[in-house]
Image: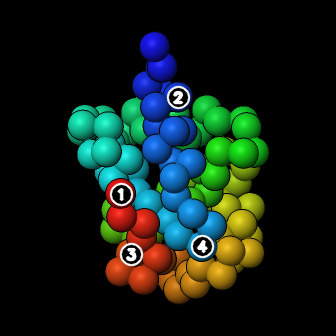
Amino acid sequence: MKSFKEKCYSVLKKVPKGKITTYKSISRKLNTKAYRAVGNAMNKNRNNKIPCHRVINSNGKIGGFNKGINNKIELLRSENIEIKNNRISLTKYEHKF
């Protein structure tokens, strides 16, 4: 049986390059309201194949990243995701599950 953390990563792997999702969207996909637990799982990730940089806050703010916020911004920009005032347009870039 998969751990909660592994379930979060499985959902996140479905978000394609150039798109983002939110902690809340991953929680909903897992039928829970444990948004903070999703954030904690993302923070614990050390596997570069899990694209945790693609997870942002539901208000469009960048949020945290275990490798530093500047690295997260660099990764997002490398995927052609536009960041204005430390926010990303959910209508333009959000992946719908």
Q: Which residue is mark 2?
A: 6
Q: Which residue is mark 4?
A: 18
Where residue 17 sits in the image (x, y, percent)? 62, 67
Of the residues under marks 1 and 2, which one precedes in the sequence?
A: 2
For label 3, count other residues whose C-alpha is less than 10 Å away and answer few (under 14), some (14-19) or many (20+): some
Secondary-structure class at tag 2: helix
- Going by the picture, which residue comes out furthest to the top? 1
Give the number of the mark in front: 3 or 1: 1
Residue sitting nearer the eye, 31 or 39: 31
Tell me the CA gap for discs 3 and 1.
13 Å
Of the residues under marks 1 and 4, which one precedes in the sequence?
A: 4
Identify the residue at horizontal 63%, vertical 52% (top origin): 51
Identify the residue at horizontal 72%, vertical 66% (top origin): 75
- Is 80 on the left-hand or right-hand side of 86? right
Secondary-structure class at tag 1: loop
Of the residues under marks 3 and 2, which one precedes in the sequence?
A: 2
Q: Which residue is mark 1?
A: 97
Label 1 is placed on what type of residue? Phe
Placement of the C terminus among the 4 image quadrants: bottom left
Q: Badges 2 and 4: C-beta atoms under 8 Å apart? A: no
Give the number of the mark in front: 1 or 4: 1
Q: Please tell me in which quadrant of the rendered image residue 50 appears.
A: top right
Tell me the CA gap for discs 3 and 2.
25 Å
For label 4, count other residues whose C-alpha is less than 10 Å away and answer few (under 14), some (14-19) or many (20+): some
Identify the residue at horizontal 32%, vertical 37% (top origin): 30
Q: Which residue is mark 3?
A: 90
Tell me the CA gap for discs 3 and 4.
12 Å
> Does the rendering let one see residue 36?
yes
Tell me the CA gap for discs 1 and 4.
15 Å
Q: Badges 1 and 4: C-beta atoms under 8 Å apart? A: no
Q: Badges 3 and 1: C-beta atoms under 8 Å apart? A: no
Residue sitting nearer the eye, 6 or 39: 6
